[in-house]
Image (spheres, rainbow, N blue to C red):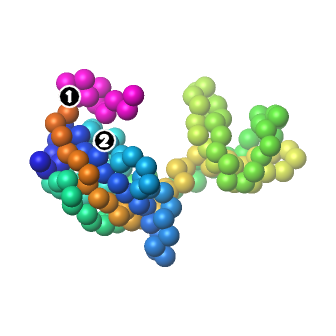
Amino acid sequence: MKITQDKVASFHYALIDRKKKVLDGSRGGDPLPYLHGHQNIVPGLEKALEGHEAGDKFTVTVMPSEGYGERDEELVSIVDRSAFQGMELKVGMHCQVEDEDGELQLVTVVEFNDEDVAVDGNHPYAGKALTFDVEVIDVRDATEEELSAGRVNLD
């Protein structure tokens, strides 16, 4: 069975950098299942998976526009250190902050001092070409529940 709209595909992947170092991945654990055609993974990877079937292995490089987008420097901001009261800050740590609309946003601490904390709301892979080493493990029809939810139920 080929990966097409409304199929559930499970795959292993390794996200690798230019030096072939693995930055992220699923190998050594369970394969990643997703509902094809429902924007559950980055668009460029979903496009590359289209038409593949169980047993296929391939490598694809996804440009930022089809991955996590370009970096947006407006998503880097300075927050008063008091907003992080009781937290031991480290450069590179991820935390949630409340934006102007009261929504929680995941940010990365990029710099701090006794008064201020610089945080970056960009995805860590924003602005980067992403190379995925992929192995398709399984393809099946989605259930009615999955189609209704627009995603695979991982419970």
What segment carries the magenta color?
144-155
- Residue 64 quadrant: bottom left
Is residue 67 in view?
yes
Name the quadrant of the C terminus.
top left
Compute the Cα span from label 2 to label 1.
12 Å
Q: Which residue lies furthest to the bottom in this view?
A: 19
Report if residue 145 lies within the magenta region: yes
Please say if 91 is above or below 129.
above
At mark 2, the secondary structure is: strand
Q: Number of numbered discs present? A: 2
When the figure is inspected, residue 96 is found, relative to residue 60, above or below; the finding is above
* SS of the residue under disc 1: loop
Res. 147 image quadrant: top left
Q: Residue drawn at (48%, 65%), measured in percent from left and top?
A: 22
Q: Mark 2: which amino acid?
A: Tyr
Around disc 1, counting alpha carbons within 10 Å, would you say few (fewer than 14), some (14 to 19), or many (20 or more)?
A: some
Which numbered dot is residue 143? 1
Amino acid type, label 1: Thr
User: 71 left or right of 53?
Assistant: right
Label 2 Cα neighbours within 10 Å, binned few <14 / some 14-19 / many ≥20: many
Query: Where in the figure is residue 148, as x and y percent of width and height?
Result: 24, 24
Q: Left or right? Give the position of 128 relative to 98.
A: left
Q: Which one is in front, 42 or 13?
A: 13
Residue 34: assigned label: 2
54 lies left or right of 151: left
Question: Residue, x 65% and y 40% (percent of image)?
Answer: 95
User: Where does the image place residue 59, in percent across and percent down from the top left?
Assistant: 31, 67
In the image, is residue 39 part of the stretch drawn in magenta? no
Image point (35%, 54%), residue name: 12
